[in-house]
Image (spheres, rainbow, N blue to C red):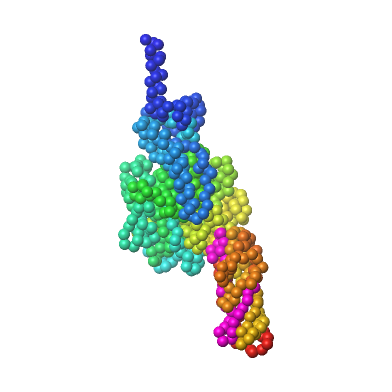
Amino acid sequence: MKRNNIILLPIFALSLLFALYGSVSLGAAAQPAAEAEWRSKVDQELLDSIDRRGADQSIEFIVRIQNEPENSITAVGTKEERTAMVYNRLKQQAAESQASLIEKLNNAGAETRSFYIVNAVYVRGAGSLVSTVAQRADVVHIHANPRVKLDVQATTSFPFIGTQAPNAPSTVEWGVEKIGAPLVWSAGITGTGVTIAGQDTGYHWEHPALKAQYRGWDGATADHNYNWHDAISGELNNNDFNSCGYNLTEPCDDISSTHGTHTMGTMIGEDGNNQIGVAPGADWIACRNMEEGYGTPATYIDCFEWFLAPTDLNGANPDPTKAPHVINNSWGCPPSEGCNTSNFDLMNTVVENLRAAGIVVVVSAGNSGSSCSSVSTPGAIFGGAFSVGATAIGDTIAGFSSRGPVLVDGSNRMKPNVTAPGVSVRSARGTNSYGSLSGTSMAGPHVAGAVGLLISAHPPIAGQVEAIESYLEETAEFIGIGDCGGDEVFNNTFGHGRINVNHAVQAVWDLDIVKTAPDSLLLLPGGQGDFTKTFTYSIAITKTGSHITFTDVTVTDTLPVGTTFVSANRPVSVTGNVLTFNIGELAPLETVDLEITVLGEGTPETFTDFVFPAAEVTAHAVPVQTGNTATTTVNLSNNWLWLPMLVN
């Protein structure tokens, strides 16, 4: 009898094991590892919670599967091509690698949610599942899913101001003015053609400063499909009251400060009088990642994933062509609230995949200053995130603005990347009002709006995240070094400096093109007054700025009317009367001289002058540039003499 008991117990245990994750011979589910081995794959706080509450109690966790190939994704082409390439690859990887695990978890009664932007599965189920899942060979790590409170700079926040009138009709807010946005508007650049995204506490989309710019509003009706997503499906704040509810089908902001609404106002807001936004011509879309200021890594990932390929309101039919150009984020996750080096890597992979997809990720640096190394939470600490500190109206650093270097992950990385206005920033509040808040959450939106203006000024730069960030960094204004290391080029207090979007746009247009006609033409008369003459004109292209090397530079020139091409001093492609020169790279302060020889023909009755159309220059990182001598003319009609030789 005792022998039977000894035999029956292992059979029962093996049956339970098989029910949870299948036969041990199927590859994905490996032989049970030693306890120390599988426990090393689980966040310690998760293990502690299971020990405290009991293995039969429900718990949330995130299972990370396989590191490769998600960390090695590269994409090329246009913004749309990059986004689609990354989406398709990540989606395929998740489908192929997660099916077995999800099936076993669902069979065990767990709730699951597959992520593909990082190869991971959210799980809500019995704590006993953790040890079972950790023993699978395909599981890299099991992360906790802590509830994290929004990092709000309360000490210098300003109260709700109700129906406060604008400072003055058509007054531009000081931060928008400080970064040079109105100068960009004066050139006709307001953000048109760009989509800016925010993930935050939610958004009051019908606020007068936001409604017209919402991508889901056509001026008559609203369509929230592909323009809004709610990652909040249940209570996170341990508070029975929520002013908006859950699983929202239209944007709503559930926090009293209307934090998300305020940030979006700084990015795109404008109502005819209140000029609160940097890029008022841009469209916006959004995702709620917090309930009353509380979010989790899973809700943050959910929003990021939705931005990569927005879906309809049912979460179906994802479409990467509707992905935004830039995402603004204000959340943080400090170690004191459950984040650690393991889920640092989880969130970092998300940011890197968005970057590969051609989407700029702007993150507030945090409000833990003024001590050094206070940039300490995701995503501000990441190399792929564009982190933003806060400045005051006098271009001093805000006392609360977090500083680098980043020590929490051992990188010693310099942060923030740049700074922007973040003290007493007036923007949209409530459903139809205006008021001021302070924090790096107010600084980041200035930068997200600046990204929108830069892309609108030069659409081909869309998707080129590194180039966009370089323009903003290298054209930022030096306003100080601070006490945390670095120099006037890059330091741990101001980053590369306080952004100036006008300088960034000018840098992307930083070419001088001079097309010069010859001073004199020697005309040789033929019979009956006809003449022919070979002459040479020149085009000088100078990279006047000292910021960026242009690549793939192409010069296109149209021959003067009445002439035919003879030769040029550099290799050229000739199609009809259009010449194309492939220059290659154009370094800062470098000049390329082109000389074109043509044959001119005409008669005094039919020919008046040689008109030299403007040359055009295009490049990988610059828009079409037109020569500044667009109407250069050599006039012959006033000096025509019937002589054997004519000098004009």
In percent of width and height, residue 348 lies at 50, 44
Residue 371 visible from this viewpoint? no
Residue 56 visible from this viewpoint? yes
Q: Look at 40% across and 22% down and name the residue there.
A: 13
Q: Is 300 located above or below residue 573 in the figure? A: above
Q: In which quadrant will I find the C terminus?
A: bottom right
In percent of width and height, residue 524 lies at 66, 83
Q: Look at 44% across and 49% down and name the residue there.
A: 308
Q: Look at 38% across and 53% down and name the residue there.
A: 227
Residue range (magenta):
597-624
Q: Which residue lies most toward the front here?
A: 527
In percent of width and height, residue 540 lies at 63, 69
Q: Look at 37% across and 42% down and name the residue there.
A: 237
Figure quadrant of residue 426: bottom left
Figure quadrant of residue 108: top left
- Residue 564 magenta: no
Task: Name the side, left or right, on which 509 lies relative to 239.
Answer: right
**How many numbered badges does the structure rendering display?**
0
Q: In which quadrant will I find the N terminus?
A: top left
